[in-house]
Image (cartoon, rainbow, N blue to C red):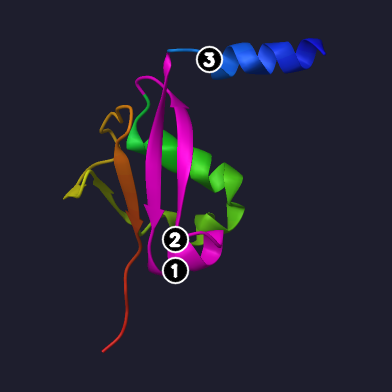
Amino acid sequence: MDKEVITKIESDDTSSVEIKVLLFARARELAGVPDLTLKMPSGSTTQKCMNELVLKFPSLEEVRSCVVLALNEEYTTDSAIVQHRDELAIIPPISGG
């Protein structure tokens, strides 16, 4: 029971943000989901978000080094800070003709 109380307190913590993650192409195939909500500590970078995604979906390691990140529909860097309700897109290279 104590563990449940601790979990609830942590989830009510205001020092965290929730972002929507969109996965495209091969990243979507590897994760098996088109999108998800990710809860991160305040001040987290897009790189930390990507690290968390790889922990949740280890198969994403395959595309990690070659993805492009977009934050709120604009290309971004690994060091960008995510804010509550931001939208982070994970875009791997797309091949085709």
Q: Residue under circle 1?
A: 26
Q: Which residues are magenta?
A: 15-43
Image position, residue 30 (x, y; %): 54, 64
- Which of the two discs, 2 and 3, labels the residue nearer the N terminus? 3
Q: Residue furthest bottom?
A: 97
Task: Residue at 25% x, 33% y: name it.
Answer: 80
Q: Residue under circle 2?
A: 63
Please state which of residues 13 and 74 is positioned toward the viewer in this rendering: 13
The amino acid type of the residue labelled 1 equals Arg
Quarter of the image for residue 95 reads bottom left
Which mark is in front, 3 or 1?
A: 3
Q: Residue under circle 3?
A: 12
Kindly state the secondary structure of the residue where label 1 is placed: helix
Separation (CA) of disc 3 from disc 1: 34 Å
Kindly state the secondary structure of the residue where label 3 is placed: loop
Image position, residue 88 (x, y; %): 32, 45
- Which of the two discs, 3 and 1, labels the residue nearer the N terminus? 3
Left or right, 24 with respect to 80, comes to right
Q: Is residue 43 above or below residue 34?
A: above
Kindly state the secondary structure of the residue where label 2 is placed: helix
Task: Residue at 33% x, 27% y: name it.
Answer: 84
Image position, residue 14 (x, y; %): 43, 12
